[in-house]
Image: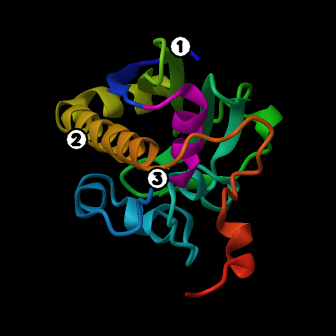
Amino acid sequence: MDADESVSEHTLVSAGAGRTYAAIGEADVSGDRLLGALGGLTNLAERLGGEAVRPRTLGELLGPELGFVTLRDEPGSAREAGLVIRYSAFDRGVERLEPGAFEAFSEPGHLKVVAGFTLEPQGGDRTFLTCDVRVRATDDDTRSTLGSTWFFAGPALRMLVRRLLQLVRTAAESGPEPAEGSNGAGDHDDAEHLRAG
């Protein structure tokens, strides 16, 4: 999607691409005060979608319950989600779309937002992680409104993206690398077989 405005940030993660990709879905966003203050992510559903769903993880935040549609999902390589927002002084909310309808959506008065993560293995257990957020207005009036508010929205979005990357990096670096063919349960399923003493 061509963007009217965008933010791109990067970080180097001390974990492999598989673990880093898993951390995108696992990163805890539920109680993060910075995310709450900058983007209202802890009550995004109530603010935009009118539902009582509160995301606990980044994976839930980028999920269909809050109106996001999966645009790209390539484990270990990339993940993108799109969101369409009604954006006017009088009406704000989320348009719930099927994934195939996102690209063609063009109803005036909306912003199309794509949040994407790309992962580039750097050798060893290191991954170069990028988060891009691209915003495109569906008409000239909405584009003008976006442009006139970007002086505030752009820096706030940049801080939000940096915080998301920090949460993903922390989750990736503190979790175990997934084993080949594993379901991610690790040794937890074996706890019942351990003996005390």
- The location of residue 121, given as percent across then percent down, is 52, 16
Point out the frontmost of discs 2 and 3: 3
Task: Say if the magenta span includes residue 138.
Answer: no
Q: Mark 2 points at which residue?
A: 156
What is the quadrant of the C terminus in the image? bottom right
Between 31 and 3, the residue placed more toward the observer is 31
- Disc 3 marks a residue whose amino acid type is Ala
Are discs 3 and 1 less than 8 Å apart at CB?
no
> What is the quadrant of residue 40 in the picture?
bottom left
Which residues, given as a range, are shown in magenta? 15-26
Of the image marks 2 and 1, the number of the one nearer the N terminus: 1
Secondary structure beneath label 2: helix
Between 107 and 193, the residue placed more toward the observer is 193
Secondary structure beneath label 3: loop
* Residue pictured at 36% horizontal, 52% vertical: 89
Q: Name the residue under label 1.
A: 2
Are discs 2 and 1 less than 8 Å apart at CB?
no
* Residue pictured at 63% horizontal, 47% vertical: 68
Q: Considering the whole magenta stretch, tell me its main secondary structure.
A: helix
Between 133 and 9, the residue placed more toward the observer is 9
Q: Name the residue under label 3.
A: 27
> What is the quadrant of residue 158 in the picture?
top left
Point out the frontmost of discs 2 and 1: 2
Are discs 2 and 3 less than 8 Å apart at CB?
no
Of the image marks 2 and 3, the number of the one nearer the N terminus: 3
